[in-house]
Every structure is written in structure tokens, then in C-alpha cells.
Image (cartoon, grey):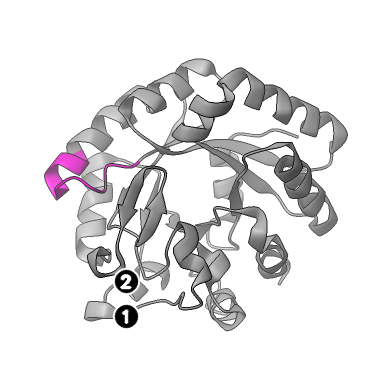
């Protein structure tokens, strides 16, 4: 059953994380929906700008229509991941997405805010929620690559200002995890640099938090997050189906 992303986040806010998965082919769509069905867990299905360009938006939409018919018990929402202004506008216009992410994290703080504001105004006028990003994860995001030494952790004070000024509905934060092949190096972990990023997930932040690339983190860190209680308000985006088992185990706890 397809639902709006804001409905999933509203139901989960302060209670549990929601797994969000980028899928790239038929096999991954089957794997994601089969896993969600077995776990009885809602999911967010994500398509990046590069995936939309490669597969064509209509092809992706019909893959999801087929999955919805084959797995009718699975509750899911559709999200455009790591978009730019153009791709976010196209996703909104398609009518297939209930959530878009504008990733302007590579820009200076004020420019990131301005870009996010523009996307937010357009998306919100169509009833679409907006995710933004502050800080930069190490690893790979489509064509962009950030070396480990260039990763920029999210400053909680800046994050609060960012959300207030942009009006974004959820915020992706950099707290030590990484994208792409980096997550398979075995050194995925959370960082407490500046004593700051941890504050984002300890109940003080009023907006759902997107914690990317958890699939490389050790299970004890998943469990630590789950034990933080109802004050922990977040959405957890896990970008590949490789970690569905650990993600669903976390959702079931």
C-alpha cells in the first residue's frame, strides 16, 4: 500500500526508525518488498537522480506498481534521494513522489539555506515534504565523492538554525557514517567530534533526523540507538538493500 512519506514519519516520530532503501533494479525491488513483507515493516523506497536518468521515471513507476500488486500488505512511500533543484522539480511534477531531498550540502551554509528554501517553497505548494542535508558524509553520492579527511560533521546549533530558516521537513546529518564503497571498509562508526552530533539524536531536535549509511555500522550501535527511548526522533535512511536484515531487526525491537 502506497502512502505519503509524511504519514510514515508522523507515525514513527519519537517511536522508531524507518528504513529507506535505494533500489536500482528488479531484483532489488523484489528483495526489498519481500523483506518488508516478512518483517511486517513499512519502508521508504528511494530513487536517486542518477537512477531516474538511467532507468527513466516511468519504468521506475511501473516497477513499483507491480510490487504494490504483488506485495499488497507492504506499506511504503516513495522518495527522491540526493536531488538537485532540477531533479526535485521533475519529481514533484511527476506526481509519483511524496518526498524529495535537495542535497545542497556541498554549498556554503547560506547558499545551502537559499537553495533548500527555493525547493521547499515549490515542493510544499504541491503537498510534497522536503528533506535537506547539512554536513557532508564521507564516501560517494552519485557523482560526488568526499574523502574521509574532507567529511564535515553536522553542528547541532547550525542544524537548528538551518531547519528554522529553511522549513525543511527532515534533515540528513553527518555524524560519522559514510556512503558507497567506504561503508565496506569495516570502520563505520559514529563520531562525537565537538561533542555535537550526538545531541542531534538524543531527543532535543524537533525534526525527524535522517541517519544515512547505517548498513556499515556495528549492530551494537543500532541497539544503542534503539535503547535511547521515545525521545529519540529520527528517520534512518539505509541506502542499499545489503543491510535489510539488520535494519528490520532494529525496526522490530
Query: Which quadrant holds the N terminus?
Result: top right
Q: Is residue 37 magenta?
A: no
Q: How many marks?
A: 2
Q: Which secondary structure lies at badge 2?
A: helix
Near-viewer residue (68 or 127): 68
Counting from the top left corner in percent of width and height, residue 119 is at 31, 29
> Do residues under tags 2 and 1 come within 8 Å of each other at their CB atoms?
yes
Residue 130 placement: quadrant:
top left
Vertical relation: 164 (above or below) 149: above
Near-viewer residue (20 or 169): 20
Q: From the viewer's perspective, is 51 left or right of 101?
A: right
- Which residue, given by chain and number where applicable, does mark 1 sit on? 192
Counting from the top left corner in percent of width and height, residue 102 is at 35, 38
Q: From the viewer's perspective, is 135 left or right of 12?
A: left
- Which residue, given by chain and number where applicable, does mark 2 sit on? 197
Q: Is residue 105 magenta?
A: yes
The residue under the point 45% across, 54% down is 208
Mark-to-mark CA distance, 2 and 1: 6 Å
- Write down the region rendered in magenta: 103-113
Vertical relation: 23 (above or below) 189: above
Residue 8 placement: quadrant:
top right
Vertical relation: 64 (above or below) 29: above
Amino acid at each position: 500500500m502506497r502512502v505519503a512519506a509524511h504519514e510514515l514519519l508522523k507515525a514513527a516520530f519519537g517511536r522508531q526508525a524507518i528504513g529507506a532503501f535505494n533500489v536500482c533494479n528488479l531484483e532489488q525491488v523484489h528483495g526489498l518488498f519481500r523483506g518488508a513483507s516478512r518483517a511486517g515493516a513499512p519502508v521508504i523506497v528511494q530513487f536517486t537522480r542518477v537512477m531516474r536518468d538511467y532507468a527513466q521515471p516511468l519504468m521506475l513507476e511501473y516497477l513499483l506498481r507491480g510490487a504494490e500488486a504483488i506485495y499488497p500488505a507492504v506499506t511504503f512511500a516513495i522518495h527522491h534521494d540526493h536531488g538537485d533543484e532540477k531533479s526535485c522539480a521533475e519529481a514533484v511534477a511527476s506526481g509519483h513522489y511524496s518526498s524529495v531531498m535537495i542535497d545542497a550540502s556541498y554549498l556554503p551554509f547560506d547558499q545551502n539555506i537559499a537553495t533548500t528554501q527555493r525547493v521547499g517553497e515549490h515542493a510544499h505548494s504541491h503537498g510534497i515534504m522536503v528533506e535537506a542535508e547539512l554536513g557532508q558524509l564521507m564516501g560517494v553520492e552519485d557523482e560526488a565523492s568526499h574523502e574521509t579527511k574532507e567529511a564535515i560533521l553536522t553542528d547541532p546549533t547550525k542544524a537548528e538554525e538551518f531547519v528554522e530558516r529553511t522549513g525543511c521537513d527532515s534533515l540528513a546529518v553527518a555524524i560519522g557514517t559514510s556512503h558507497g564503497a567506504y561503508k565496506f571498509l569495516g570502520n563505520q562508526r559514529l563520531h562525537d567530534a565537538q561533542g555535537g552530533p550526538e545531541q542531534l539524536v538524543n531527543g532535543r531536535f524537533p525534526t525527524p533526523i535522517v541517519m544515512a549509511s547505517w548498513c556499515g555500522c556495528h549492530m551494537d550501535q543500532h541497539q544503542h540507538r534503539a535503547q535511547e527511548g521515545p525521545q529519540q526522533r529520527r528517520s534512518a535512511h539505509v541506502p542499499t538493500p545489503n543491510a535489510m536484515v539488520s535494519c528490520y531487526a532494529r525496526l522490530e525491537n
